[in-house]
Image (spheres, helix red, strand yellow):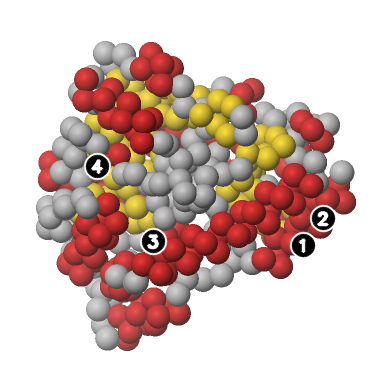
Amino acid sequence: LNRRLAEFGTTIFAEMSALAARTGAINLGQGFPDTDGPEEVREAAVRALRDGRGNQYPPGPGVPELRAAIAAHQRHWYGLDHDPDTEVLVTAGATEAIAAALLALVEPGDEVVALEPYYDSYAACVAMAGGTRVPVTLRPHEGTFRLDLDELRDAVTDRTRLLLINTPHNPTGTVLTREELAAIAELAVERDLLVVTDEVYEHLVFDGAEHLPLASFPGMRERTVTIGSAGKTFSFTGWKVGWITAAPALVTAVRSAKQYLTYVSAGPFQYAVAEALALPDSYFTGFRDDLRAKRDLLAAGLAEAGFGVFRPAGTYFVTTDIRPLGFDDGFAFCRALPERAGVVAIPNAVFYDHREQGAPFVRFAFCKRTAVLEEAVRRLTALA
Ligand code: PMP
Ligand code: GLN
């Protein structure tokens, strides 16, 4: 392993899912649903396979049906207009979108400012691009994690090339507010920065919180790469269909990198996701409402079990503080948890450069069947 990647080793998600498989523990670690997405979307994939649509290399930017559906989705939900031919790119999951965007847009030595804790691939991809990551820490404040806008402004230097934003935010569940996003947008315009914004949990916002795409703020349309994922929005994480929407020059740049990473993304699934994006609003709101009920169940159960709970306004993760239980090292806690309670969780410290900042926090995923969450809560309650 070269020096750029040496510090990254095995991703925590693989490690923790392997631990779950080995111990038979309930896996609330890696974020994937235990119920597959809509039947009609699976049928659409089968039809595409059977009818020979996408079984050979599809077009590099993605099949036209899917690009049109992505543009229609952005218009329908956010009033954002994108030309499906020049402003949309299909990727192998959001993961490839992140990688291709950073590889295409970051010069060696450029600084990339990202909100810490961050999804683990951000750090690895900044490193692969030869960039320097500059974390801005979201700090616990009255039961949520908040962005300090002054810290964000102070993090930007003459070497900053790009802001890497994620809202709704994994792992904290924070949904950036209109005021915060407006301030980020102003900063990006003032300092002439590009913004890559990971919005894969766009439909998972609760309690009246609203997901606002950064691209919809003044001056942002031309400088923003927005990332979405069918894995998250339709519960098909194994399909690896994601996308970006951006201005033509940015899409062209990201496509240049994508061409040499995967060339194209899996064909038949693209046709199926095109149909999924056209599902009625009730699918999206139903999915959200179902997850809100699961959040309530798990958040209440964890509080009952003695965890400090950061109630998420978005995503399907809940971050907890283990100090009320008498622990302070999330790594040790998560490594021992399958043995002690038959549950797997993720230590948030892996999402931090400042590991000590994340040490007492542990993330649980609630994209699981109700009975599974109930059993997990029973086990965790016995822990106290
Ligand atoms: N971004 C964030 C914030 C995520 O949590 C994840 C993982 N679910 C991804 C990107 C990767 O998405 P995909 O599975 O589409 O590659
Ligand atoms: N994004 C998912 C999570 O945060 C996992 C994706 C992965 O394993 N790379 O749990």
Asked whether residue 351 appears in the rendered view, the answer is: yes
For disc 3, does the CB lie below 8 Å from ligand 1? Answer: yes
Q: Residue 367 location in percent, x, y?
A: 58, 59
Give the residue type at disc 4.
Ser
Q: Residues within 10 Å of mark 3 (few under 14, many from 20)?
A: many
Q: Amino acid at mark 3?
A: Ala
Residue wearing tag 3: 230
Residue labelled with disc 1: 375
Q: Which mark is residue 379?
A: 2
Give the number of the mark in front: 3 or 4. 4
| Closer to viewer: mark 2 or mark 4 | 4
Which tag, 4 or 1, sits closer to the chain's start? 4
The mark nearer the N terminus, 1 or 3, is 3
Residue at image location 16% in from the left, 37% down from the top: 222
- The answer to whether residue 26 is above or below residue 261 is below
Quadrant position of residue 265: bottom left
The C terminus is located in which quarter? top right
Q: Quick one: SS at disc 2?
A: helix
Categorize mark 1 by other alpha carbons within 10 Å: few (<14), some (14-19), many (20+). Answer: some
Is residue 238 at all visible to an observer of this figure? no
Which labelled disc corresponds to residue 216? 4
Cα gap from disc 1 to disc 3, whole angstroms: 28 Å
